[in-house]
Image (cartoon, rainbow, N blue to C red):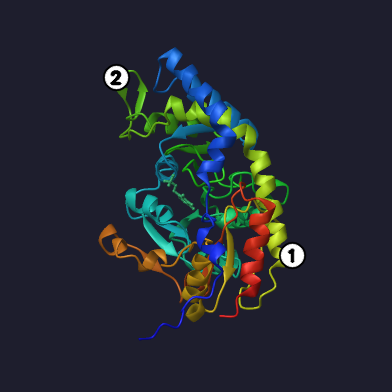
Amino acid sequence: MNVTPRRQFAVDDIERPLLGLNDFTRQWQDIEHDVLSAVRRVGHRGWYILGAEVRAFETHLATMWGVPYAVGVASGLDALEICLRCLGVARGQAVLTTPLSAFATALAVLRVGAKPVFVDVDATGLLDLERCKAVLRRRPDIRVLLPVHLYGHALDLGDLAALRDEFDLTVVEDCAQSIGAGSNGRATGTVGRMAATSFYPTKNLGTLGDGGAVLTAERALAERASSLRHYGQTSTYVHDHVGLNSRLDELHAAILRDAMLPRLEKWTSRRQAIAGKYRQELENPRVAVPSVPPRSRSVWHLFPVILAPEKRSALLTYLRERRIEAGLHYPRLIPDQRALREGGEFEVIGELEQARRLAGGEVSLPIHPFLTDDDVQRVIAVCNEWDG
Ligand SMILES: *Cc1c(COP(=O)(O)O)cnc(C)c1O
């Protein structure tokens, strides 16, 4: 019988609590008091849908973001769909976007009946704007752009605005991972006519459930979004649009305003400090730290490292044995998802070489704001010791 011990990690590793990609237990310890008082306030008021809490949160979010209007909706996916519908993006229209994102990005395009057109990303994982320019030059049929500020990095917003102006593009920015991020002295979400964000629990500004918001500088678009989230109503029992039921709850709005928004800056700084440590101290050549867009003020929603594809699963196993959870963002490109074949028309431009490299080799290390300094040092030490 072969009794050679297969695994060689120390016993104390087995007994360690898992160092996860998120830590909602530690988060609860931080926010409990404020969440409970928010819930009590909503309960005392006895008003649960579209009231003073949603309005107050929208005002706070818009002020914090530096945009005139924010409209609370039920999810990031809905926020994207509502943006596209507000701007009249409809059946058959082509929308240039990234193959490397949460599936929701492309799903929103499919849901309005439009056609996602996938263009490759650059080495940082974000839509390659130079490539987009080349495509837009020869394809006058594509005039809608849906970029994603992936991993919490901001696309170069000067370049994005220049592209918008050169081709007269309708831009909707997916800011689900980029709340607080910016470049060229401006915030993500301010180049497009509209932007969408998500309050999914793992996002930098997450709630205890689902939620999202639409952002815009245009009053008419904010009004259209408010109508679309509420059955297309423009006033009680008057339906001027074919809308959705996609409201942010009063409870989530109260929790976001009382417990989450006031902590966002502190949480973001912590993510940035951890990213700084990782970038400084990860020195294993097998675990490459990718470059960041040069002008991005990143909020580090994720911390990606890049492996040789054939080594990736070995690193994941090694980390799991040492009680460190890692993630993959994203292992299968959107145009390779089976759902697209039944979802309507789509188009892929080129070989998507960079996106495939990242899909095959990316690993996300834990970077949530509740990691202690010891946790961070442990992740660094464990990664640096890996000789797989
Ligand atoms: C999370 C996410 C979404 C979808 O948000 P939900 O609130 O989960 O619907 C869309 N785009 C990106 C880039 C995301 O990370």
Q: Please tell me which residue is depicted at 48% across the width and 67% down the height of the picture.
A: 119
> In the rendered image, which quarter contains the N terminus?
bottom left
**Left or right of residue 45: residue 162:** right
Category of crowding for the residue at label 2, using alpha-carbon neighbours closer than 10 angstroms: few (below 14), some (14–19), many (at least 20): few
Which image quadrant for residue 284?
bottom right
Q: Please tell me which residue is depicted at 54% across the width and 66% down the height of the picture.
A: 11
Would residue 291 be visible to someone looking at this image? no
Q: What's under tag 1, amino acid-wise?
A: Gln
Q: Which residue is mark 1?
A: 280
Q: Which mark is residue 237?
A: 2
Q: Position of residue 94 (x, y in %)?
A: 40, 58
Q: Please tell me which residue is depicted at 40% across the width and 59% down the height of the picture.
A: 116
**Left or right of residue 230: residue 201:** right
Q: Which mark is residue 86?
A: none
**Of the residues under marks 1 and 2, which one precedes in the sequence?**
2
Q: Position of residue 371 (x, y in %)?
A: 62, 50
**Left or right of residue 313: residue 299:** right
Of badges 1 and 2, nearer the viewer stands: 1
> Between residues 196 and 273, which one lies in front from this camera angle?
273
Q: Is residue 123 above or below residue 276?
A: below
Q: Is mark 1 within 8 Å of ligand 1?
A: no
Category of crowding for the residue at label 1, using alpha-carbon neighbours closer than 10 angstroms: few (below 14), some (14–19), many (at least 20): few
Would residue 131 be visible to someone looking at this image? yes
> In the rendered image, which quarter contains the C terminus?
bottom right
Q: Secondary structure at mark 2?
A: loop
Q: What's under tag 2, amino acid-wise?
A: Tyr
